[in-house]
Image (spheres, helix red, strand yellow):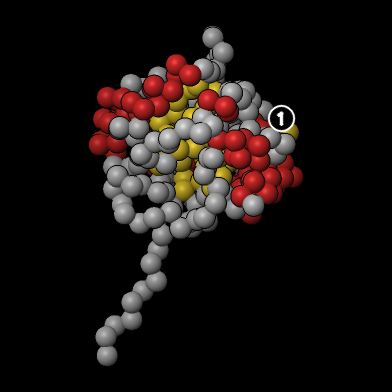
């Protein structure tokens, strides 16, 4: 008698450049970013998160230390991808994070050029998501360039001139810029100013299959609100219908 075939274990990150396994989650996937407390991880998991993000950027109210991130990552249930958000990080910083925190993906949220994205992807052997800020149609060309080197894209609102934070500012861009587009060759995620009140509209208008939220589910900067987290997930489910 032949040995039983084990059940397949789905990769929590869809990575078409390296893995032919399709994303097993239908509809719209959610990334709750900027988690800093164990209760944030629990709330995200209970709301059906597909990804959770930990911020390594000192200026952010959501910044966590490596020790904090490691403890939080170890609490994340299986099947939820753990993402490290960094901003223009050098190799030494990334070496330290990757060596100590169990991760599934790196999110580059700074001014990293395509060459740097490709370098990080090759060096660390993890899928890389590149954030691209958008304020008008001229910014869409950058998305095309990064789609050639990143495993995923995060399309975010471009921060105001002189802003301290490259993301997490609670700002949205004109979603009409993405309406009716022929999309990119890699998975992409919609971010920027999403809240329980507007995410269904954003999904319906853009056709996004993945959404990212941080400040939109907070009661104070860096403090996730359990009720808002669940309300966001409920609104996404309504958009799927």
Q: Is residue 156 left or right of residue 219?
A: left
> In this orientation, does residue 68 appear?
no
Most extreme residue toward the bottom is: 1
Most extreme residue toward the top is: 162
| Residue 89 percent across, percent down from the top left | 38, 25
Q: Residue at x 46, y 58 (%)?
A: 24
> In this orientation, does residue 239 appear?
yes
Label 1: element kind:
strand
Figure check: 52 above or below 4: above
Figure check: 16 above or below 167: below
Task: Report the label total.
Answer: 1
Q: Residues within 10 Å of mark 1 (few under 14, many from 20)?
A: few
**Residue 170 found in image quarter:** top right
Q: Residue at x 46, y 41 (%)?
A: 83
Figure check: 121 above or below 43: above
**Residue 125 found in image quarter:** top left
Identify the residue position indicated by label 1 in the image. Answer: 220
Q: Quadrant of the N terminus?
A: bottom left
| Residue 152 percent across, percent down from the top left | 40, 38
| Residue 66 percent across, percent down from the top left | 46, 36
Q: Residue at x 64, y 52 (%)?
A: 241
Q: 218 or 58: which is nearer to us?
A: 218
| Residue 111 percent across, percent down from the top left | 40, 19
Q: Residue at x 49, y 37 (%)?
A: 189
Q: 90 or 179: which is nearer to us?
A: 179
Q: Is residue 106 left or right of residue 65?
A: left
Q: 233 or 87: which is nearer to us?
A: 233
């Amino acid at each position: 008698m032949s040995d039983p075939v084990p059940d397949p274990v789905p990769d929590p990150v869809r990575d078409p450049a390296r893995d032919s396994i399709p994303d097993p989650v239908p509809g719209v996937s959610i990334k709750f970013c900027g988690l800093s407390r164990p209760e944030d991880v629990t709330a995200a998991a209970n709301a059906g998160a597909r990804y959770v993000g930990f911020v390594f950027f000192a200026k952010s109210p959501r910044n966590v230390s490596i020790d904090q991130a490691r403890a939080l990552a170890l609490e994340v249930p299986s099947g939820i991808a753990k993402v490290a958000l960094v901003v223009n990080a050098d190799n030494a910083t990334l070496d330290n994070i990757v060596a100590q925190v169990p991760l599934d993906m790196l999110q580059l949220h700074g001014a990293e050029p395509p060459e740097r994205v490709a370098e990080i992807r090759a060096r660390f052997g993890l899928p890389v998501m590149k954030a691209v800020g958008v304020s008008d149609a001229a910014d869409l060309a950058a998305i095309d360039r990064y789609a050639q080197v990143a495993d995923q894209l995060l399309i975010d609102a471009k921060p105001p001139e002189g802003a301290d934070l490259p993301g997490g500012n609670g700002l949205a861009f004109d979603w009409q810029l993405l309406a009716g587009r022929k999309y990119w060759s890699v998975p992409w995620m919609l971010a920027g100013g999403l809240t329980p009140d507007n995410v269904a509209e954003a999904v319906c208008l853009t056709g996004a299959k993945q959404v990212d939220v941080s400040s939109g589910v907070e009661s104070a900067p860096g403090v996730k609100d359990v009720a808002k987290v669940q309300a966001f997930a409920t609104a996404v489910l309504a958009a799927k219908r």
